[in-house]
Structures are given as C-alpha cells and as structure tokens.
Image (cartoon, rainbow, N blue to C red):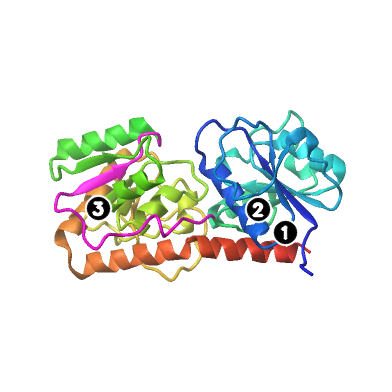
Amino acid sequence: MQAGPARTLFFIPPVRKAAGGVAVLCRMAAVLREAGRDVSLVLRERSGWRPDSEGVPELDFDRAGLTRGDVWVVPEGWVNALAPGLRAGARCLVYVQNWAYLFTGLPPGVEWRSLDVSFLAVSRPVAWFIGQSLGATAPILRPGIDLDVFSAPSAKPDTLAVAYMPRKNKALADQVRAVIRARGRFSPEWVEISGLDRQGVAQALARSHAFLATGFPEGCPLPPLEAMASGAIPAGFAGLGGWDYMRQAAPPGGASGGEPGGYVPPCPMDPVPWEGNGFFVPDNDVMGAALALENALELWQRGGEELARVRRALAATATAYGLEPQRQAVLDFWERLG
C-alpha cells in the first residue's frame, strides 16, 4: 500500500496560451498519476490552455469536492483559489513558481501568516525569498526539461548566431542588440524565438551559439536551461531564480579585462557539480548584458579547452534538470507528505 495523501488536486489557473508554470503543474500531476496516486486537475475554466494531461482526470472548480484528507495545490498569485481547501480543512500547498507573485492577489487585510498553508518553492532563490519575507521553510521542487527534445548538435554552424525571446522584456533585448551593433565587434545572426512549437524552439537553439537571457523576474527559468541543453551559452539576466543553476563562467573582471564577470547575487547558492555555465549580470543592466554576450561569442571564437569546459558545464547542468530528476523529486516529496 502506497504511503502519502489519499487524493491530490492541482488548481489549474485559466491561461489563454502556453504557460510554463501550468505545464509544470500538469507534469507533476502526470508523474503522480503514473505512480498510482489519486490525482486530478481542477480547472477554473475549461477553455484555458493546458498541455496534454496524459490521462489525468479533470474536474470543474465548483465540483472539486475537497475534503480534509486531500492535498490542494495552488500556484502563487491565485490566493482566492485556496478558499475551497481552507474551508474543507485540506492540506493547502502554495507552489511558488515566481517570487515576484508571492504577494500578488492577497485580499486587503489578509496576510500569508494568517492562512493555514504551507509553501513549496521552485528553486533555491525562491525558497530564500519566502524564508526572508515570511520566515517560512519551503521545500524545493524544481521543474524539468525534456532532454529528448533539447540536445546539443555535434557541430554548430560557422556563422555565430544568438537566440533570444522578444516576449522577455523586449525593449531591453532591443537595446542589447543595438549596443552589440554599435560596438561592431560581432555581427551575429539573431534567432528570434517567437510563435514556435517545442520542436521549433529546439531547432532554433540547436543552431545558436549563445542565448541572450533577458527575462526577469524569474522563479527557475527554463529557456536558459533549454539553451544549455542545446549547447548555446546563456548571457544576460538571471531574474534571481536563475541562480538556482547559473554559475559564472567569467572570472572577476570579465573574460576580456574590465568586462562583467564575477557578479554575485544576494541569495545563497547551493554547491553544484558543474563549473561556470554562462555570463550573467544584474537584471536590467543593458550594457552589462551586451558585454556578457560578447564574452560568450568571443569564447566561441577562441575555442580550445576554455570553450570545451563551458560546454561540459552546459551539459552537466541540463542533465541535472532533466525530467527524471524532476519525477523522482516529486515522488519523494509526496512520499514524505504522509
């Protein structure tokens, strides 16, 4: 007989287009169902987007029928969705996938400390943010990426290419591109990742040498991880949450002397078994991001053992964030729930 709660229900918020946070929730539910647990997705709206639920039953929000023995998982930012679980006396878990939305949606006069909830964090920086702001300890359940889809090719094209996502702070991405163009050291092909399916994203990253990371705030950003799996060196912003796995490849002072390198965030960073896997600067630092991107491109030009070392770090990082580590972490956590 399997230990753990009798039933787990995941609240799925209404989103109109592909959303990484919803995909992570659905993936967790599928893992638990595959392991034989009683799991359901609870939909606020049937018309909202969600990935293939892999056979996980779906319930309407108004008919979830929560009871005291249930576990009710709600993403941060949807505080009102906790109400059915709180009324029923269920175990309410708030899964914080982005620290920036922890306090979003709290009704006037309501504080997290007054609610009978526990927190889960998507990364070490998010757990740190929760601990610093609420004094609460949050176990960490990291997301995973599909390494069968995102993988590094045996060779990259001769022409340097940089992938980027315009929807992630587009104005800043445009400024970084303008700085690169004005400095004139590099004229890379810019590979825009927009409106592509997962295979299309994988193909774009596979032919790119670097990935311009302009997303912030972030909880545990997956695009830089997918870039790493594809052999593209990330450069730019961590969004705080990226420091779960991002480590500096540039020494203090930068790879080219006087350029960015060695920036350390305020959050603690766990020891990891990989070396530097990118060039990272404070969020919103346009010039820093441009210089960091030049460091990544220069590394490709120089080649040699330094590039090989960074590429090994990219592969090691991606492996640590594959779907299997995520699956095992989810199963272990639910086993401990008792």
**Can you tell which mark lies on residue 120?**
2
Image quarter (top left, top right, bottom left or bottom right) of the N terminus: bottom right
Residue for badge 3? 209
Image quarter (top left, top right, bottom left or bottom right) of the C terminus: bottom right
Per the picture, the main secondary structure of the magenta-coloured stretch is loop
In percent of the image, x 40 and y 41: which residue is there?
197
Q: Is residue 30 left or right of residue 72?
A: left
On the image, the x and y values in percent for residue 82 come to 75, 39
**Amino acid at circle 2:** Leu
Q: Nearer the viewer, mark 3 or mark 1?
A: 1
On the image, the x and y values in percent for residue 15 come to 57, 33
Question: Relative to residue 246, is residue 211 depicted above or below?
Answer: above
Q: Nearer the viewer, mark 2 or mark 3?
A: 3
Q: Upstream in the sequence, badge 2 or badge 1?
A: 1
**Marks 3/1: CA–CA distance:** 42 Å
Q: Residues within 10 Å of mark 2 (few under 14, many from 20)?
A: many
On the image, the x and y values in percent for residue 262 come to 34, 58
Magenta-tinted stretch:
143-168
- Kind of element beneath mark 1: loop
Residue 222 vs residue 287, the one in the foreground: 222
In percent of the image, x 74 and y 28: which residue is there?
108
**Marks 2/1: CA–CA distance:** 19 Å
Residue for badge 1? 37
In percent of the image, x 73 and y 33: which residue is there?
80
